[in-house]
Image (cartoon, helix red, strand yellow):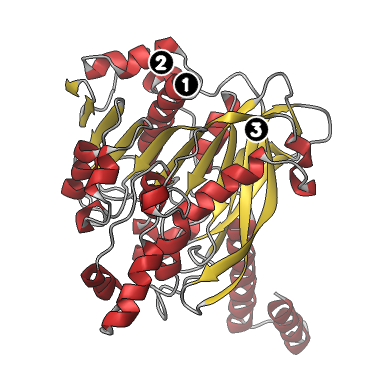
Amino acid sequence: MPVLVAAFFIDLEALMFVPSRQTVRKIFTLMLVASTATLECQAETAPEQLYLAKPAEMRPALSQPGSFPVGVRTVELMHENQLDLTSQQSGPRKLTVELWYPAKLLSGHRMANYTSMTKSQQAFIIQGNAYRNAEPDTAQPLPVVVISHGYPGNRALMFYLGEHLASHGYLVAAIDHMHSTYAEIDQKKAPYAGFLNTLYHRSRDQQFVLDALRQSGNPDLQFIEGKVDKNAAAVIGYSMGGYGAINTVGGCFAFTEQSIAAFTGVKDSGANQALQQKLNSCAGGQLPSEVKVAPAWKAAIAIAPWGGQHQLFSASALKNIKVPVMYLAGDKDDVSGYDGMRHLYEQTGSKHKYFLTYHHAGHNIAPHPAPVVSRKLAGDFAHYQEANWATDTLNDINRHFALAMLDCHVKSIKARCDLLQQKELTSLWPGYVKGMPTALSWESSSGKQ
């Protein structure tokens, strides 16, 4: 802008008050370029509202906001003495966490914005529907929900789900997984730089965040101390987050030397065997022979979970999972593979398990709608987009089924459990009749519906 303004005034001096047509044209061109640049700059830095209003009857009933105003805070948690598989050095592992919770609304609180970026590291800002640093509602202890993004991703990718669950009475923690965020992964130069650490740390991060929220003494978490239900929690994971969630509730990893070689490109047998011993852990880093799933985990939701297509989970461990699990999958998923996700569902031994299929959908069934800046590059835009589904519709369905799952198995609300066991899909959508998506199918532990 300063250069353009300077050029404008230089031309005025050159005119000597007798402008030619060419000079006038140049002046207006410079002014137009300057104003366009200003508008583009404002568009890229202003918070974006990613959702348009829809009539309530055109949305699943449980996708509607709850009765609580929502507060949000950003905290940093430090997991000490953690191994970096790439460097083979141990040190602190910093996890930035977004916390949403039921709030008391007092004067002076501003609406939250979430700073994010695309896969190509183009920054944008999202307008949230929570209040930054609002005081928590202390009426009752809050069950914990841990949200875990894919590779790469960040804590804002499913902000819509965090805000929604908090409005219904949950404390929601969305993690920035170190070595796995958009900011750290250069998609052009080193797209797999953090993949090995992602394989190793995803479940460890999920368990650590739950433990941190249930413990006392952390000054950054003092605002919720004494307000957390230490016996009730759920984990929601997308893609690599789903891979971690299955492990967190007991689906131990079963990496082979061959699968490790395929992922790393390392041909040294000894090195791959050493990695195999480190990777084949369970429930937050425990040895499979000694695994004890934290009893606080009451439910898991795996959205497009990765790993089933590569048989990375122990068949016997999957059969021994006791925690209720819900799987959400697109039948055209070319990242996690629909057959691989169906295999995970079928092998999961939970008494209560569910499988929702988005027909004609691929892998991108979890992210929020595409921001404006993502529309400049196909790779960025495709990260948020499904060819045959509206993203806000996908988000609404995710809100609905996630709340039904958690209210049933975390809060023990019988009406929600009845809703999950309905025989006809249309009965799952009270108040959602006209325009209901028909490209869905629903299965549960009681049989295909």
Left or right: 334 with respect to 204? left
> Which element carries disc 3, helix, strand or loop?
strand
In this rendering, would 205 be left or right of 337? right
Spot occupied by residue 90 in the image (x, y as percentages of width and height): 58, 72
Q: Residue at x 63, y 77 (%)?
A: 24
Q: Which element is circle 1 on?
A: helix
Instruction: Tell me if residue 360 comes above or below residue 136 in the rendering.
Output: below
Q: Along the line of sight, which residue is nearer the eye, 120 or 248? A: 248
Q: Amino acid at mark 3?
A: Tyr
Q: Which residue is mark 1?
A: 407
Q: Mark 2 or mark 1, which has the lower sequence index?
A: 1
Q: Marks 1 and 2: in contact by CB < 8 Å?
A: yes
Q: Amino acid at mark 1?
A: Asp
Q: Residues within 10 Å of mark 1 (few under 14, many from 20)?
A: many
Residue for point 58% across, 83% down: 22
Q: Residue at x 34, y 15 (%)?
A: 419
Q: Secondary structure at mark 2?
A: helix
Quadrant holding the N terminus: bottom right
Between the C-alphas of marks 2 and 3, the distance is 21 Å
- In the rendering, which numbered label is found on residue 101? 3
Is residue 200 in view from this perspective? Answer: yes
Q: Is residue 408 left or right of residue 318?
A: right
